[in-house]
Image (cartoon, grey):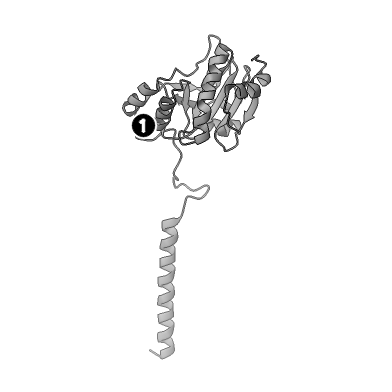
Amino acid sequence: MSRSARWTAVVLIVFVALAVALWREIGTDRTAAPGSTEEAPTARDHRDADTPAALQGPRAAAGLPPCPGPGPNPQPGPPALRGITLECAGDGELVDLAPALAGRPVVLNLWAYWCGPCTDELPAMAEYQRRMGTAVSVVTVHQDENESAGLMRMAELGVHLPMLQDGRRLVAAALKVPNVMPATVVLRADGSVAEILPRPFAHADDIAAAVNPSIGVPG
């Protein structure tokens, strides 16, 4: 074999080796492309560790009330929430959101256990609910898959409000809530959105001033 032929063979071998190495690296690091049949990681409503048995202790410690359910005359409820079913963290029951939130003004408080401003706001939400009685329903929506941590945060704060477990943030997506926490969504009795308030509140008076005029509730 001539010298030029040998060099050609060496160059070809090196080229093939580099191509194989690059292909392997791409194959290792790639993620599923749109339209691909390969499964990509998806968000979950709660962790695998949050089994019914594991949640018994946190649920008992939090002592949360049941989540709202449909009234005696079921109504369709908020159109954007139709078809969304979430777990009520307090008792593990599934809640069909649209009919459950129909027929009354509702304040949805979107939060997560690790959110500092959320921790400051939740007691104010509880006080607002106490003042409003049956005129308004305050429902918290925990936007992290660690359901146990959400329950324990409620227990730590001594806040007793219904809590929906929404690790996939379906409510925020459906209602087009900005990607901030805490955020508050005010729903009229007919299911329409009265306000989206992507900011924290420190006092029940501030909540009432921001919420009540938009739903025609005194106080």
The vertical placement of 183 against 67, above or below, is below
* Mark 1 secondary-structure assignment: loop
Q: How many marks?
A: 1
Q: Residue at x 66, y 18 (%)?
A: 215
Residue 9, horizontal then vertical, whole percent: 41, 81
In terms of depth relative to the viewer, which is nearer, 184 or 176? 184
Residue located farthest toward the bottom when viewing the structure as drawn: 2
In the displayed structure image, the side of residue 135 where residue 116 appears, left or right: left
**Residue located beneath label 1 in the image:** 50
Residue located farthest toward the left when viewing the structure as drawn: 53
Q: Residue at x 52, y 14 (%)?
A: 70
Crowd tier of the residue under label 1, counting other residues whose Cα lies within 10 Å: few below 14, some 14–19, many 20 or above: some
Q: In what quadrant of the picture does the C terminus appear?
A: top right
Question: Residue flagged by tag 1: what amino acid is it?
Answer: Asp
In terms of depth relative to the viewer, which is nearer, 165 or 21? 165
Q: Residue at x 59, y 13 (%)?
A: 135
In the displayed structure image, the side of residue 44 where residue 105 appears, left or right: right
Write down the quadrant of residue 51 in the picture: top left
Write down the quadrant of residue 105 in the picture: top right
Q: In what quadrant of the picture does the N terminus appear?
A: bottom left
In terms of depth relative to the viewer, which is nearer, 42 or 181? 181
Residue 153, horizontal then vertical, whole percent: 42, 29
Residue 69, horizontal then vertical, whole percent: 50, 16
Residue 196, horizontal then vertical, whole percent: 63, 29
Residue 57 in sight here? yes
Residue 192 in sight here? no
The vertical placement of 156 against 218, above or below, is below
In terms of depth relative to the viewer, which is nearer, 95 or 184? 184
